[in-house]
Image (spheres, grey):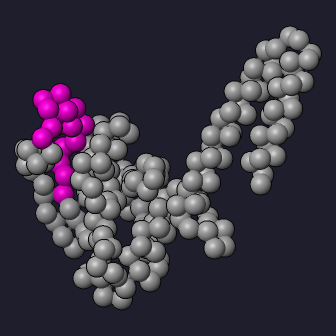
Amino acid sequence: VLRKIIPKKAFFAKFAMNTAEQKEFDNAIKQLAIVNEISSRTIPALSSKPEDKAIYVLAVQLKQARCDDKLIQKMFKLIGQRLILALSYEDKLQLALFHNKLIKDEPRPAVEQKLQLQGLSINDVWDNIALSLAKIEAKEGQSAQEAIARDMERASLLKEIDALEKKMWSERQPKKKLELRERINALKQKMEE
């Protein structure tokens, strides 16, 4: 277990953050610390290739209960490593990672928060962590990226269906209502595929 505290000033200097970004970061985050590393060096049973990146667990103590998703995404983009953020506020802990999109679980008491490592390689472990946080199950022979992309497409279709249903219920003309119903049914059928 590591416990390397990252000073905010060093973080600001390394990533050349402007004053507004520094203030936003400082208002939301109390402290950053690297608390764990998942790699073939720390878990010898994991197979790895030279190009495989280690996974770091970064403990982030928050000053408020919620942290803006844009700020979290900015941290992932700036650091450029495979990271699992353990966002903590008082006794609650929320895990977050970026795997094609920002994936977070719900905040829960720290003692209840668990993360299972499954897989024979670092890449498998990373993919399985992303799937478990996103609460997605990959179909047989489907990669984690495909499963997450499928889930994103499904969420987009649900949003579009919801908007069309609202529009349909407010529409007065029967012909337009029927057209909207047909589009909704087509989208629902596409979602089931």
Q: Residue furthest top?
A: 172
Evaluate whether residue 3 shows in this view: yes
Percent across and percent down for residue 14 are 11, 48
Q: Quarter holding the C terminus? A: bottom right
Q: Residue at x 91, y 17 (%)?
A: 175
Percent across and percent down for residue 136 are 59, 60
Q: In the figure, 104 relative to 113: above or below?
A: above
Q: Residue furthest bottom?
A: 45
Percent across and percent down for residue 104 are 44, 51
Direction from residue 16 to residue 52 in the image, left or right? right
Q: In the figure, 112 relative to 30: above or below?
A: below
- Give 67 or 101, whichever is nearer the viewer: 101
Q: In the figure, 1 relative to 45: above or below?
A: above
Q: Residue at x 32, y 62 (%)?
A: 82
Q: Residue at x 92, y 16 (%)?
A: 174
Percent across and percent down for residue 67 are 34, 39
Direction from residue 165 to residue 11 in the image, left or right? left
The span picked out in magenta is 16-33
- Give 86 or 21, whichever is nearer the viewer: 21
Magenta span includes 1: no
Q: Quarter holding the N terminus? A: bottom left
Direction from residue 9 to residue 23 in the image, left or right? right
